[in-house]
Amino acid sequence: MKWRRFNGEPIHLPIMEEVRHAIVRETGLGHRLKVCIGTDSQVKGLETEFATVIVFLREGHGGFMFIHNEKTRDVYSIKERMLVEVAKSIEIAYELCDLFTEYDVDMEVHADINTNPQFKSNLALREAMGYILGMGFAFKAKPEAFASSSCANKIVN
């Protein structure tokens, strides 16, 4: 999986090592961290592009993020696409969760799913929430899910 920084600089280390370095560096500077992981997607012609982000929030001192993009020609219903987004977020959250526990860093998984039933994405809300909470992760949906609905959204649009 290829990851990069927001400025486009590629991350050459495995993401686990890069995240560990970031946590050690930031906590060494006295920052209290919180990590939010989210994915968004955009259908562009015959392709669907997914962007998964790991957002590091420094309490009172801004933040930064690591980004992974992926394109596919698979065709999804809106509900399927929402659940694929959640699965991509859970995959990276699961890979990194022991690291966050080791360094006492709070982590949330954000789903780009609207809590308002008038929106199409709401069709996937119950399953997404069950999937994330069932994995033992803190869950946020729109409008609190900024990692997916703002950060990842900026990458795919």
Image (cartoon, rainbow, N blue to C red):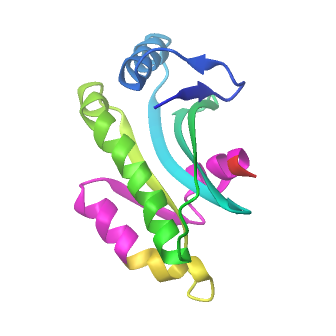
In this rendering, the answer to whether 125 lies above or below 152 is: below
Q: Residue at x 30, y 37 (%)?
A: 95
Occupied quadrant, residue 98? top left
| Position of residue 140 in the picture relative to residue 60 (left or right) | left
**Stretch in magenta:** 127-155
In this rendering, the answer to whether 124 lies above or below 98 is: below
In this rendering, the answer to whether 44 lies above or below 152 is: below
User: Which of the pair 53/50 is nearer the observer?
Assistant: 50
**Is residue 146 a member of the stretch shown in magenta?**
yes
Q: Residue 151, percent across and down?
A: 65, 46
Q: Residue at x 69, y 44 (%)?
A: 155
| Position of residue 50 in the picture relative to residue 124 (left or right) | right
| Position of residue 49 in the picture relative to residue 111 (left or right) | right
Q: Residue 79, percent across and down?
A: 49, 76
Main secondary structure of the magenta stretch:
helix
| Position of residue 85 in the picture relative to residue 151 (left or right) | left
User: Which of the pair 116/52 is nearer the observer?
Assistant: 52
**Is residue 126 a member of the stretch shown in magenta?**
no
In this rendering, the answer to whether 153 lies above or below 82 is: above
Occupied quadrant, residue 100? top left
Q: Residue at x 39, y 69 (%)?
A: 128
Q: Residue 59, percent across and down?
A: 54, 33
The total of numbered circles placed on residues is 0
Q: Residue 83, percent across and down?
A: 43, 66
User: Which of the pair 58/94 is nearer the observer?
Assistant: 94
User: Which part of the image, by quadrant, shows the N terminus?
Assistant: top left
User: Which of the pair 147/29 is nearer the observer?
Assistant: 147
Q: Residue at x 38, y 78 (%)?
A: 126
